[in-house]
Amino acid sequence: MELAVYKISGEEAGRKISLNDSVFAIEPNDHAIYLDVKLIQANKRQGTHSAKERSQLSGSRRKIKRQKGTGTARMGDIKSPILRGGARAFGPRPRNYSFKLNKKTRKLARLSALSYKAKDKEILIVEDFNFETPKTKQYIEMLSKLELTGKRTLLVLPDIKENVYKSSRNIQRTKVTLAANINTYDILNANKLIIAEGSISEIEKLFS
């Protein structure tokens, strides 16, 4: 597969780059994608939720009314879960939501996501670039010239470019990452995948 390379000014650079079919044109595996996205979202959960049960709640253990003869349901102490201010029955406890997923499955998920993007023509290759100073306006202008204003974009860089990252971090629906750190969720969440030219070899090296 070949894609044209663009400048950040929106013009074609006059050359094309070839994408490795073993990375960008495999048969996607939807179940692998599901498992990897589930893992990524599970790892983001804090798991600090907690509710007090009867044994943890302060209050009298005295039975608040007699068992029979009241014409209403029997009732225990004031900490009963059915009373306002009472304890929580089977409430949430702090826990770790992460789970294990094989490296080969995660790799297959990312390859599947990249293949979907390539198939749907949602990959844009741009020349390697950097900004002299961090400037949000410069990044917005670049998106405008590439006709990506208002779209969710993921920019993949070959190495750390602090000025580019700082220019983008205040813009909604925009994310910048390194080729070594791309994940399935970010790839699929973006309407357009902007890949710097130098990142192609890094991605292919990562998955080869």
Image: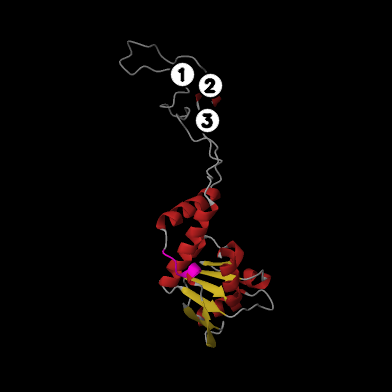
Q: What residue did someone put label 1 on?
A: 77
Relative image position of residue 171 (x, y in whole percent) = 55, 69
Mark 1 packing: few (<14 Cα in 10 Å), some, or many (20+)?
some
Q: Are marks 1 and 2 in contact (CB under 8 Å)?
A: yes
Q: What is the three-letter code of the residue carrying label 1?
A: Asp
Q: Which residues are magenta?
A: 22-27
Q: Which mark is residue 44?
A: none
Task: First in sequence, mark 3 or 2: give its number.
Answer: 3
CA–CA distance in space, label 3 to label 2: 12 Å
Q: Is residue 190 visible?
A: no
Mark 2 packing: few (<14 Cα in 10 Å), some, or many (20+)?
few
Task: First in sequence, mark 1 or 3: give its number.
Answer: 3
Residue 127 counted in the magenta span:
no
In the rendered image of this protein, does residue 192 appear above or below residue 184? below
Residue 23 counted in the magenta span:
yes
Mark 3 packing: few (<14 Cα in 10 Å), some, or many (20+)?
some
Question: Exactly how many numbered labels are in the figure?
Answer: 3
Relative image position of residue 11 (x, y in whole percent) = 52, 87
Q: What is the three-letter code of the residue carrying label 3?
A: Lys
Snapshot quadrant of residue 180: bottom right
Q: What residue did someone put label 2 on?
A: 59
Q: Residue furthest right?
A: 132
Secondary-structure class at tag 2:
loop
